[in-house]
């Protein structure tokens, strides 16, 4: 199992970097919004800030939480505790069904956690860092406050045990999920007819642009990260027929200082109602 886990972790890193580069190039050739038109310097500064935040988050997760996730996964396996282990032992399901079930449970939790970040004011203080990006592109997929990643990582420890998830299944899920997250944050000109087909299964750029709208009824919709059907099942799905008219970001965080690394770290301390 360890060689599989190591290979998956290596694949995850390679996939994240490769998709980041490919989407960054796509944005350069065919951007959906023209907010970086003619200013590669501004685009580079924007990308650098977001990626620094992402790197800090990744370092914390690697140093603090991966070992705890592994411990929870090993304990659940040895104790035969958790939903997928119970199904595996009770119905002799094959490994691939165990993996599919684990991925579905993890993605449902991701939907629920994302929705909690919008509906619970304390968590919104941290999540607003992600939404305050008024020039959303592929690097926005890495722009999350350290506090949000901390709480998300803590909650995962008991959930890994409750769901009966192997750590390699978590790594596999995160690899696929983050690739889709990078895609639907990207500032790419993706034809609507293809977007419409894809969003029957996964979250797409035009679907997620609605979620990053400044208009709250749109902001509070489309919480899915990988599979789009959670929003349809929960009746939180929303689409804007004219995505080019969507204004991204948050009104109270439009100052240049709010877009700096220091400003992003300080965002949860700001009065979220100030204009």
Image: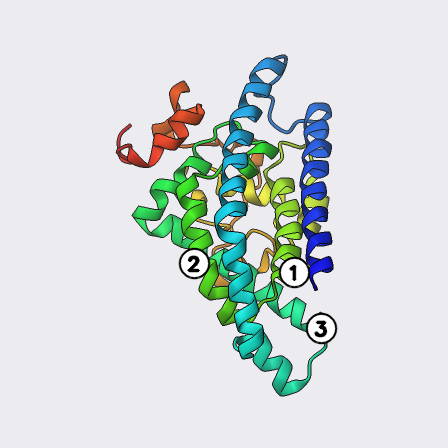
246 vs 201: above or below: above
- Residue at 72% over, 27% down: 25
| Residue 122 appears in the picture as rendered | yes
The residue positioned farthest toward the bottom in the image shown: 90
Q: Nearer the viewer, mark 2 or mark 1?
A: 1
Q: How crowded is mark 2: few (under 14 residues within 10 Å), some or many (20 or more)?
A: few
Question: Between 216 and 259, which is closer to the camera in this rendering?
Answer: 259
Q: Which mark is residue 76?
A: none
Which one is earlier in the sequence, the residue at label 1 or at label 3? 3
In percent of width and height, residue 267 lies at 35, 32
Question: Between 149 and 227, which is closer to the camera in this rendering?
Answer: 149
Would residue 44 be found to the left or right of residue 65 on screen?
Answer: right
Query: In the rendered view of the protein, which quadrant contains the C terminus?
Result: top left
Q: Identify the residue position indicated by label 3 in the image.
A: 95
Q: How far apart are marks 1 and 3 (CA)?
A: 12 Å
Q: Which mark is residue 168?
A: 1
Rendering quarter of residue 154: bottom left
- Residue at 52% over, 59% down: 69
Q: How crowded is mark 1: few (under 14 residues within 10 Å), some or many (20 or more)?
A: many
Q: Distance between the residues labelled 3 and 2?
A: 25 Å
Which one is earlier in the sequence, the residue at label 3 or at label 2? 3
In percent of width and height, residue 82 lies at 52, 75
Element under label 1? Answer: helix
In percent of width and height, residue 235 lies at 48, 60
**Way the structure is coloured:** rainbow
Question: Between 191 and 161, which is closer to the camera in this rendering?
Answer: 161
235 vs 92: above or below: above
Q: Identify the residue position indicated by label 2 in the image.
A: 155
Q: Distance between the residues labelled 2 and 1?
A: 18 Å
């Amino acid at each position: 199992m360890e060689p599989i886990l190591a290979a998956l972790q290596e694949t995850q890193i390679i996939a994240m970097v490769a998709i980041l580069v490919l989407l960054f190039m796509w944005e350069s050739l065919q951007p959906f919004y023209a907010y970086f038109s003619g200013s590669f310097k501004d685009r580079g500064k924007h990308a650098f800030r977001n990626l620094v935040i992402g790197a800090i988050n990744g370092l914390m997760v690697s140093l603090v939480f991966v070992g705890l996730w592994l411990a929870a996964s090993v304990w659940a396996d040895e104790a035969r505790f958790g939903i997928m282990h119970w199904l595996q032992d009770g119905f002799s399901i094959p490994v691939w069904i165990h993996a599919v079930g684990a991925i579905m449970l993890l993605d449902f939790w991701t939907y629920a956690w994302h929705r909690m970040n919008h509906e619970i004011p304390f968590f919104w203080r941290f999540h607003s860092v992600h939404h305050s990006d008024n020039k959303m592109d592929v690097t926005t997929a890495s722009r999350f406050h350290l506090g949000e990643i901390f709480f998300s990582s803590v909650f995962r420890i008991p959930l890994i045990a409750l769901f009966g998830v192997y750590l390699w299944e978590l790594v596999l899920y995160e690899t696929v999920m983050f690739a889709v997250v990078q895609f639907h944050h990207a500032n790419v000109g993706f034809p609507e007819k293809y977007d419409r087909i894809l969003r029957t299964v996964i979250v797409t750029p035009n679907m997620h642009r609605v979620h990053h709208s400044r208009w709250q009824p749109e902001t509070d919709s489309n919480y899915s990260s990988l599979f789009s059907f959670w929003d349809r099942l929960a009746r939180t799905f929303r689409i804007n027929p004219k995505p080019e008219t969507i204004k991204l970001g948050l009104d109270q965080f439009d100052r240049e200082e709010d877009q700096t690394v220091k400003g992003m770290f300080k965002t949860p301390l700001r009065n979220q109602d100030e204009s």
